[in-house]
Image: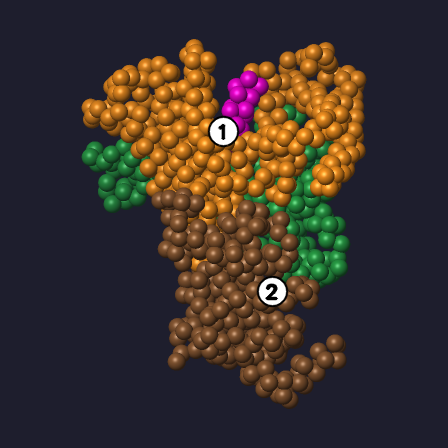
Amino acid sequence: MTAALDIRGLKKAFGPVEIIRGVDLEVRKGERHALIGPNGAGKSTLFHLISGRLAPTSGQILFEGRDIAGHAPAEICRAGLSRSFQITNIFPEMTVLENLRCAVLWKLGHRYSILRPVSGLADVAEDCARLLDQLRLSHRRDARADSLTYPEQRALELGLAVASGARTLLLDEPMAGMSHSETAQALRLIMEVTEGRTLLMVEHDMGVIFEMADRISVLVYGQVIATGTPEEIRRDPAVKEAYLGSTEEAA
Amino acid sequence: MTDNAINTPAQPRPLAAGLLWTGAALLLLVALPQVFPGRAAVSTLNYLGTMALFALSYNVLLGRTGLLSLGHATFFGLGGFIASHAVLAMADAGWSFPLPLIPAIGGAGAFALGIFGGWLASGRGGMPFAMITLGLAELVFAAAALFPSIYGSEEGIGIDRMDLGASFGLDYASAADIYAIVAVWLALCAAGLWFLAKTPLGLLMTAVRDNAERVEFLGFSARRIRMSAYAVAAGVAGVAGSLAALNFEIMTVHELGAGTSTLVLLMTYIGGTRHFLGPVLGAVVIGLMKLWLSDISPAWMMYFGLLFVFVVMAAPGGLAGILASGIGLARSGTLGAQAHLLGAIAAAGAIAFAGIVVLVELGYRAGLDAALGPDITVLGLGLNTQSAGSWALGTVLLLVGAAALRPLNARLADLRHSLAKTGETA
Amino acid sequence: MSIDVLAFSLLNGTLYGMLLFLLASGLTLIFSMMGVLNFAHASFFMLGAYLGFEFSQGLGFFPALILAPLCVGLIGAGVERFGLRRVHRFGHLGELLFTFGLAFVIEEAVQMIWGRSPQAYPVPAALDFTAFEIFGTGYPAFRLFMLAVSAAIFAGLALLLNRTRVGLIVRASLTHPEMVSMLGHNVPLVFMSVFGAGSALAALGGVIAGPILVTQPSMAAGLGPILFVIVVVGGLGSLGGAFAASLIVGFIQTFAVAIDFSVADAFGLIGVTAPPAALGALLRDVWNVSVSQVGPVIPYLLLVAMLIFRPMGLAGKRA
């Protein structure tokens, strides 16, 4: 079976500074894979490389067996891999419904159509209603996205990634900036809407990670130093030294 | 543009309201030449209708897709030249082609050119887009001098719209006949653009305006969306240019120059980019002001510029935004509580404005129009460019008005804040 | 082309290119640091020419060379402080529209004050002599002076950018625009200074170019688009690219004027002296096109070619 994502020898340098220094990472189909690592380890950069925001300096990113390294974000999304952003990246002046409509148009084959009004497309309406329901945003359907509360905006951010129908999702700190109770809710939401899909997620909340992840990879200083089940990662001496040790002291 | 008073959320408009609007607009189009008969008045209506369509096309870029084009007149002008040459060629060949369909040719030509131009300009939005559209417009304008057979020389390309003969029971001798053509094309194109805004492509254009990067991560090419918007805008501008050619029976290089591009930007932005009919409002107001002000003041261009800067700085929703917030205010039921402050603000604004008018008029008389002598009547006041008192009057009016505006605006904001609070608790 | 025309065109092309760079550098710095494309940049150039004219009438050319840029620099700083900063909340589109409106108002104001016809802005008497002769034709000293001033500014700018702390901040902002605000520098003050300094540079260009180019209200609208071509062709935000593009455009335009050669001449070389009667009117137009006529179009053709073949510009990295 080919992996959902198979990253080989990926490198990215900004000028003389190499941020990603040869990452090898495999994400299996259907698994929830968490990516952890100290600040500045290159997690966000790695996400940008996979999702096409940045082009790698060298190396391969095989998505379902196909090399997508250096491809445009739109192509990668069409291939079935979408992402959410750490800093909320939605359409602020459009309503929640319009946000979701944009996200489902490609998947449903309407693309750049000018034949019928969006409001008259039954499949779009149905899909959006289902998403609104799942995201618990039905009551905010016609609110402008920038008028939503922070957790609502994060839910919409997640919704945009999910709505595009991708089989693999990259979630960049979906719980960033949330309170404890909000985090618990958000986690439940993520588990629910990503059911049956492959998930690669960056998160700082260790409780969340060890609760939800099937496997964890640890990125330190631009390299993956360990991959394994939460139990294996907990026991891994290299991880303890490089990462967990320091956070335990801080906590 | 995050002003909440200006950006009312896009609510799904009930069908009944839509029909009401459509009916009212059509009725207005039919009634106007009845209300304003006379050749000169109808000719003005033709001009305003043409500019309204031109501004509507421009707003596909500026308001809908968030793209600032500085060369939109290129397609207005090229559409007009294509239409003119079509009329000339068909008259030469002795074909009978219905004159009202000529704008379709101009529009199609401009659309095709718009696809190419859009391909060049649409790689990025924002500043690069603005600069590239300016460059392309200058290219076409500068190249015009090389091809006198296409663009005519100084005097332009003239046509006789009666050369194609009568059709649809009209012989196109009178301005009223042209009005029929303008009105039908305006209604058709406006309906088309309204529909476009509702389609997936229209939604995606709004999305590109809001957050072009995110659009890419949803599987779409922002470039292709920008390019589509550009081509559509070009095509409709071409129709407008064709209408101008039929109305004036002449096209000059001036029509595709920077001045025309600036005019459409002013009309659209001052009218309001976030309301569908804002550009129409702007085209009518600015068009009328242009006709009327240019008769009574040498400074009319200056007033346009100052008005534009004022709208950019203080009322980015434009006239339509001001109207909409006025209607919102009337509906909120707090107009009575705010009336005294609003009145004071209006008075202070009027004083400051009077100061500006005095200074600008004095300035023009002292500089550009010095030959007309130092005495000048401004707003009923007898002033003299050589008297310090005249200049002081303008300065004092401006400063007093401006000084009063600041605290008044702050108080209004406070009042609205507290009104909103009591509204929530009630 | 004779050798003397070649020599003069080389000199004039360099001169024109340096002058363009004087403006393009300010525009690039403002764009890179503030993300604002200043549409009024050429208007500040024009204000420089007019104020230079006005001050030289009263005080002489050399005081004007200092005073006019100073005044325009202050005006520029004021524009940033009281205008641009306020529209910042409306995003880049608001800023772009603001500077566009400003350019419009400045052009009107110039007409209001000085009228629509060109000003008689003479070459200062102290520099009104022939500097040297090549092949029997004299080269005016004033042009040499212009070249010297432009070169001096260029050198000064290079020193400032490469050797000083201010330059370090500016360079940092060129490569990492988002970083500067995090460095704890007084960003509003930096912005105001950069905008003022850029405006002053443009005005300096205006003072020295005023006597040679015609000082008239349309000079801003004529030069502005050329500047944007340079900035795009050079690669947005790249000073090196802007320098190269300035010289390229300077040479192209100078040489185009100097070359007296048309399509008809080209056919003349192969013995065809009159357009075949069968050619349409359009082709007859093409037949009559001469290089000097094409001159004004070439920068824009360069822009289009660049967009097709190298959209990131000469030195641009960010596509």
The chain letter under disc 1 is B
Q: Nearer the viewer, residue C20 or B376?
A: B376
**Mark 1 against mark 2, which lies toward the viewer?**
2
Give the number of marks: 2
Q: Nearer the viewer, residue B85 or A118?
A: A118
Q: Residue at x 53, y 35 (%)?
A: B275
Q: Position of residue A69 (x, y in %)?
A: 45, 70
* A35 relative position to B350: left or right: left
Count neighbours of disc 1 (C-alpha within 10 A) and say few if under 14, some if 14 to 19, many if 20 or more.
Answer: many
Can you identify the residue that label 1 sits on?
Answer: B280
Chain C colour in the picture: green
**Residue B397, can we see it?**
yes
Q: Secondary structure at mark 2?
A: helix
**Residue C254, can we see it?**
no
Can you identify the residue that label 2 sits on?
Answer: A186
**Residue B273: within the magenta?**
no
Where on the picture, by quarter, is residue B139? top left
Q: Position of residue B348 (x, y in %)?
A: 75, 25
Q: Amino acid at mark 2?
A: Ala
Chain A colour in the picture: brown
Q: Position of residue A20 (x, y in %)?
A: 56, 75
Q: Are marks 1 and 2 on the same chain?
A: no
